[in-house]
Image (cartoon, grey):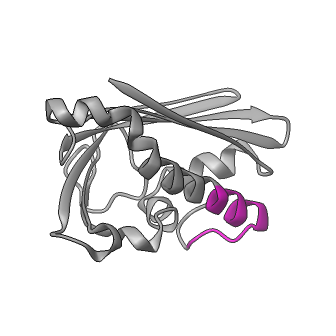
Amino acid sequence: MTTYRRRTRVDAPLNAVWDFHSRIEGLEALTPGWTNLRVESVRGPDGEDTPEILETGARITLSVQPLGVGPRQQVVSVISAREREDGNAYFRDVMDDGPLAEWEHTHSFFADEDETILEDRVVYEFPTAAGRALSPLAWVGFDPLFRYRHRRTKSLLEAGDTPAGSV
């Protein structure tokens, strides 16, 4: 499997960064328009529709059509872990159904005085032997996506301009 990582310092407290990333509105705000994201449904761990917080067991069904090319691809992601301790927090989502053979995305948050270190770590594998051979090149697609997400996180949280329902 291949791993992609990106780390950024955000001039905002851990509580604000954590809360923002814990909601579906955060995902929507951090996804670039060129992905043509549609959130189809969000179910909480007890089956509740559109929970406020994405707790362990929440299922997110979404679809994307990058650059408007080809058919929409459906992805089902499950929050498999979510922990918060003094000074750090993380949650992990795994792809339950979608175009990749494996996808495990860990979002980590570390307090550093009044700032937060945000780290994304994605472990992934393509479904075919040819795809697996090309996996190390996937950063060509991942890097613009995660660069956007990190710049947008900084922009929104450092300006105190987060979407309704978060922070």
Which is more toward the observer, 145 or 94?
A: 145
Residue at the spot 34% in from the left edge and 72% down from the top edge: 67
Please give the count of numbered marks on the rendered protein.
0
Residue 34: percent from left, percent from top? 41, 72
Which is more toward the observer, 124 or 62?
A: 124
- Residue 101: image quadrant is top left
Residue at the spot 16% in from the left edge and 36% down from the top edge: 127
Residue 159 on the magenta span: yes
State whether residue 85 is above or below residue 35.
above
| 104 lies left or right of 118 | left
> Residues in magenta?
151-163
Residue at the spot 34% in from the left edge and 57% down from the top edge: 51
Residue at the spot 19% in from the left edge and 51% down from the top edge: 47
Residue 116: percent from left, percent from top? 73, 41
Which is more toward the observer, 66 or 97?
A: 66
Q: Main secondary structure of the magenta part?
A: helix
| 46 lies left or right of 81 | left
Residue 125 on the magenta span: no
